[in-house]
Image (cartoon, rainbow, N blue to C red):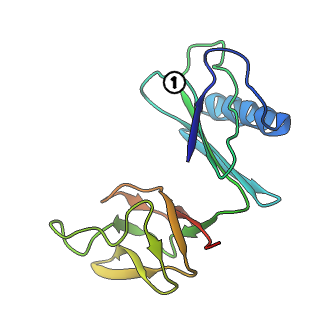
Amino acid sequence: MAKRDTTAGAPVGGDDRLIELTRRLAAIAAELGLSEIEIESAGTRLRVQRTAAPAAPVVHAMPAPVVASPPPTTVEPAIVADVAAPATFTVEAPMVGTFYRASAPTADPFVREGDVVKEGQILCIIEAMKLMNEIESKAAGRIVKILVENGQPVEYGQPLFLLEPPR
């Protein structure tokens, strides 16, 4: 995962269309008071998230780095954009509930970032109405990013993990 800080000057390289789209999504999120906005088009997923702590914009790109827009001229919280290139795929929550990385508070997590998983391997548990539902990987691959914190509520279709298929 590459991180690039663009506060030192103009963005270097990158897709101008993604930069413009990031700017538009950031403006919409600020205008509507949203903390997060996400779109997917043509195999590319773009998520813009406003954070509480003032910081420079950061872009997480898989596998090729993508450049974020410079900070907005108004005083707004920082913007974080995650772009998932077609080389990665997302494991989404199949239900509403509470996300747990391990089977017990003192147990090791089922998976960590960088782990290689097999199809059918348990990735996490989602508790729904006092029932513990094991969420399995739909395909083999390497965990690129865990997108949800332990104990956080999740909604149906919410991205949980980014996986990179085996080469």
- Report whether residue 156 is seen: no
Quadrant of the rendered image containing residue 43: bottom right
User: Would you call the spot at circle 1 few (<14 residues within 10 Å), some (14-19), or many (20 or more)?
Assistant: some
Q: Quadrant of residue 158?
A: bottom right
Using the image, determine if residue 95 lies above or below residue 16. Answer: below
Q: Is residue 31 above or below residue 3?
A: above
Front residue of this view, candidates 53 and 97 = 53
Q: Give me the residue at 64% from left, 35% from top.
A: 29
Which image quarter is the C terminus in? bottom right
| Vertical relation: 71 (above or below) 91 | above
Residue 121, image x, y percentages: 43, 83
- Left or right for 94, reference 89: left
Q: Position of residue 116 (x, y in %)?
A: 47, 72
Q: Secondary structure at mark 1?
A: loop
Q: Quarter of the image holding residue 14? A: top right
Identify the residue under disc 1.
77
Near-viewer residue (33 or 21): 21
Kind of residue sitting beneath label 1: Pro
Location of residue 36 in the rendering, given as x and y in whole percent from the top left corner: 57, 43
In the orientation shown, which residue stands out farthest toward the front? 167
- Position of 162 with respect to 53 (left or right) is right
The number of numbered discs placed on residues in the rendered structure image is 1
- Residue at image coords 53%, 38%: 35
* Residue depicted at 19% across the width and 72% down the height: 104
Relative depth, front residue between 154 and 88 = 88
Please state which of residues 96 and 10 is positioned toward the viewer in this rendering: 10
Instruction: Estimate the x, y position of residue 75 in percent, counting from the top left.
Output: 56, 14
Viewer can see residue 76: yes
Residue at the left extreme?
106
